[in-house]
Image: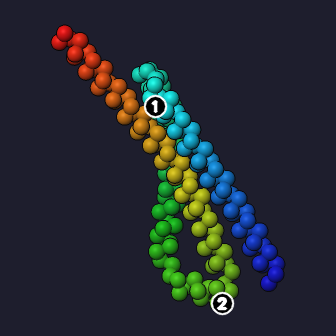
Amino acid sequence: MAVTDTAGTKSAANLKHKLKMHLDQAQERLEDAKQQIEELAEENQETLRAAAQDVRDRIEQHRMRAEEVRRDVADWIEDKKQLTQEAIATWRQKRELKQLERRAERAEEYAVNALTIAMLDADEAELAVIDAIEARLDAEAAATAASADRA
């Protein structure tokens, strides 16, 4: 029993470390996006278009992986709906390690995938912000041109 507890603790520690790394990456990605957006507000249309294209390229590069991750997440959610607390309690009571280990592995995969999706969604949000800034600059340029035409 002590070996199982030690192994379980080691696995939990590894999982925590892995999730912390993913969270740190996500936080760093969001901070980078925030900084880029702040800088973009002061840029011209050409720079905005280049930044938008960079983000589009990054999104496209990860599109297939994103679709796979989203399917995995949807599968996990469906599996979780079907899994009752009574079944889990029975597995614990009967020490059905195979079932409990599979459940833990699926939950770990879900946690990593959820963080991955959050990072992918951050790219989509960054693109939306760039597009909004670009659209606002277009509107302002048109308004300025219209005012100049009237004068």
Asked whether 6 or 90 is in front, the reply is 6
Asked whether 3 or 44 is in front, the reply is 44
Residue assigned mark 1: 52
CA distance for labels 1 and 2: 55 Å
Circle 2 residues within 10 Å: few <14, some 14–19, many ≥20: few
Amino acid on which the number 2 mark rests in the picture: Lys
Q: Quarter holding the N terminus?
A: bottom right
Q: Quadrant of residue 134?
A: top left
Q: Position of residue 151 (x, y in %)?
A: 19, 9
Residue for point 66% across, 74% down: 101
Closer to the chain start, of discs 1 and 2, is 1
Left or right: residue 25 compared with residue 127? right
Circle 1 residues within 10 Å: few <14, some 14–19, many ≥20: some
Residue assigned mark 2: 94
Residue for point 68% across, 62% down: 16
Relative to 12, say whether 127 is above or below.
above
